[in-house]
Amino acid sequence: MPRTDEAEHWFAAVYSAVQEIPRGKVTSYGHIACLLGYPQRPRQVGICLKHLPSNPEEEPGSAERQAEVLRAEGVEVRTDAMGESSVDFAQFGWFPEILPSELEEDLEESHNPLLRLSQEWAGSISENGLYV
């Protein structure tokens, strides 16, 4: 079933937002939804991530694979007696008030030298991983 223009826009916005998560950090579907201006849509964020374009050689939806990738980035992923994985959000969580790309847009309009330094910092994290 083809996606509507609205759905395509939403998928693109979610993909773009999660690409801004710094390596070694995690966030929640709910926080991504809030950053995109739709706090009532955390499940839709999860659905988008479930349908990420994948590398045919990997299993992108696998929780085990996700844990491996996060561990490689230095995130401590714990597995309990029931086999459920968890991450300490206090230590590894990423919960900015706005996306770094939005900060960059705001800073481009500013002539404040301190804000320009912040823009350089924000730009350095835009190349980071795609993990929630």
Image (cartoon, rainbow, N blue to C red):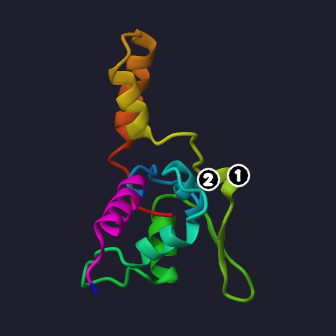
Magenta region, mostly helix, strand or loop?
A: helix
x 72%, y 81%: residue: 80
Q: Is residue 6 magenta?
A: yes
Taking 66 as reference, is 105 left or right? Answer: left
Q: Nearer the viewer, residue 123 or 108?
A: 108
Q: Which of the labelled discs sits on residue 93, or is there none?
A: 2
Q: Is residue 122 magenta?
A: no
Across and down, in percent, residue 73 comes to 46, 59
Q: CA distance from mark 1 to mark 2?
A: 6 Å
Q: Residue furthest right?
A: 81
Across and down, in percent, residue 100 comes to 43, 39
Across and down, in percent, residue 64 comes to 50, 82
User: Is the residue marked by circle 2 packed among few (<14), some (14-19), or many (20+) residues within 10 Å?
Assistant: some
x 60%, y 47%: residue: 95
Report the residue marked by disc 1. Answer: 90
x 51%, y 66%: residue: 71
Q: Nearer the viewer, residue 80 or 108?
A: 108
* Mark 2 residue type: Gly
Q: Can you say whether 80 is above or below 30 in the image?
A: below
Q: Are marks 1 and 2 in contact (CB under 8 Å)?
A: yes
Per the image, label 1 sits on a secondary structure element best described as helix
Across and down, in percent, residue 47 comes to 46, 76
- Please identify the quadrant where the N terminus is shown: bottom left
User: Magenta residues, as a range?
Assistant: 2-17
* Mark 1 residue type: Ala
Q: Nearer the viewer, residue 37 or 127?
A: 37
Quadrant in which residue 43 is drawn: bottom right
Q: Can you say whether 65 is above or below 26 in the image?
A: below
